[in-house]
Amino acid sequence: MITREQLIKKYLNFFKLKGHKEIPNESLIPENDPTTLFISAGMHPLVPYLLGQPHPLGKRLMNLQRCIRTGDIEEVGDSTHHTFFEMLGNWSLGDYWKKEAITWSFEFGTKILKLPVKRLSVSCFKGDTDAKKDEESAKRWESLGIPKERIVFLSKSENWWGPAGKTGPCGPDTEIFYWKDNTSPAPEKFDPTNKKWVEIWNDVLMEYVKDQKGKYNEAKQKNIDNGRGVERILAAINNFEDNYLTELWQPMIKQIEKLSNKKYQKNEKPMRVIADHIKASVFIIADGIVPGNSEQGYILRRLIRRAIRYAKEIGLENFTSKVALPVFKIYDDYQHLQKNKEHILKELEKEEEKFNKTLKKGLKIFNKFSKNKKELSGEKIFLLYQSYGFPFELTKELAKEKGIKINQKSFQKELEKHQKLSRTATEGRFKSGLADNSETTTKLHTATHLLLKALQIILKNDSIIQRGSNITSERLRLDFSFPRKLTKEELEKVEELVNTQIQNSYEIIREEMPPKKAIKKGARGIFDKKYGEKVSVYLIGEFSKEICAGPHVKNTCELGVFRIKKESASSAGVRRIKAVLE
Ligand code: SER
């Protein structure tokens, strides 16, 4: 048996000998690509370098990169698709080209991993108006020993990769397939529609850049982007026909079997979905996301809630954190996972509890709505979304199972109508940047005051002022005047100081007075705001004194634990901190 650790080592050693330098395994959340929510391939964080910017480590790079593919959520349940996976990648930035890329792929696969040539097939790009037929790659494969009948030419929908977001580097690719069936020999002729052929790696010949208009332009620099999924390779080299039988999944599957008292063999689909979604959720939370109603937080919510729904099918309850536990052992090399373990488990439990409260009722309502119906209206889908926390996709899937159509357009309209209404209702109610006054946002508002003061103290800079504040039900965001990036130590100290004030259980006192008096008493105002005749001053013990419209909690002990999630530049001379309360 070859382990994940051994596979990664073999890979990195092999490409190191071919002159590649290892680059870090980056966060799942893209830093500079607003067109997509998650890092979906190892090349993604490398986009600037693929476009020509010189990389400090040179022209040959390699790594292991964690990835999330949300496009595959509904495919999950078979033996080879996952939302979270790891990719082993190697790149040539305007350096070597097809000959080396293909030869090394072949060498690594057949010599190092010892995959038998008789179980391999390849596909190459068939050519269209954007790029010509890739005879060169096909010839190279042939020269290495792949028979002609095992090489097919396919169109763009199959043999073209990228860009990762909406625009960027991309190109035709050549893919390698492995015959996974252990009971019958691979057919002589390659039929890519036969599901027993599994794609195990992909050599992208990056010659194009897709622009905003959707046009493919020839790239200034020709790159190789070469990627392999750890899950599929590990299954192939260990002769498993099902990825979930490898060490990457077995501890989770065993835990699910134990908790549900059911066998994997008869419950493959729900158990795979549960394991996949919980693993992906663990990694997403570890990279700083919490369940929510937009962007990454929404995907996370969808994953957790979909896992919960499948868990019902096998009678599994209160399971999310328990099924998550083995993830920390399988991936014990990820430090950030270990460090955030408590937080991750708590977030899973919180979301599970939240959804459980309404799931049963929601399913009942769904059944009522769908009885003898051919289509579900937008209004009804919205009700399930709003009152029972059903992500749209969940309703869509339930409807599909029952053979009912759903009206997505009218749901979208309902959603927009509601968003508009709630905006109008809250506009003008709070002038201090609050969108609503729920319990959470109130807490975050108080935390913002503590944070500002803590920054002034730790950075020994009393003239730091608030330059902007935005609070959602998930997090606070504070913009403040400061000329440089904060160090890790400073951020830790700020976090600690805020948490100490929370533990000090300060009562929050509100006093009313004319603005002049407030300033004289040392109260801090917000920006260069014009105040009315009287203002409210909020005092948090001796610690902070701010002019503010509120609302605030009564005592700091209500806040829980304060955590800084991100510090970044906002604009010249202004820094931005995002933080949460746990
Ligand atoms: N970017 C390509 C893929 O994801 C090769 O790494 O398949």
Image (cartoon, rainbow, N blue to C red):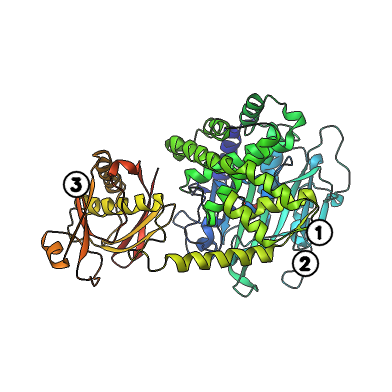
Task: Calculate the distance from the C-alpha at mark 3 to the C-alpha at mark 2.
Answer: 71 Å
Q: Residue 371: percent from the left, percent from the top?
A: 78, 50
Camera-side mark, 3 or 1:
3
Mark drawn on residue 153: 1
Helix, strand or loop status at disc 2: loop
Residue type, numbered disc 3: Gly
Sequence-wise first label, 3 or 1:
1
Neighbour class for label 1 at 10 Å: few (<14), some, many (≥20)? some
Give the residue type that dot 1 points to: Phe
Q: Is residue 265 above or below residue 230?
A: above
Is the C-beta of the residue carrying label 1 under 8 Å from the nearest atom of ligand 1?
A: no
Q: Decide if residue 144 is on the left or right side of residue 557.
A: right
Which numbered disc, 3 or 2, marks the residue closer to the eye?
Answer: 3
From the viewer's side, name the closer residue of 76 and 408: 408
Say what amino acid the circle numbered 2 marks.
Gly
Choose top left, top right, bottom left or bottom right for residue 322. Answer: top right
Q: What residue would you read off at disc 3?
A: 541
From the top left corner, tell me how far across and down residue 213 is, in percent.
Answer: 62, 75
Mark with earlier residue (1, 2): 2
Q: Which residue is mark 2?
A: 127
The picture places residue 407, in percent across and down from the top left corner, at 71, 62
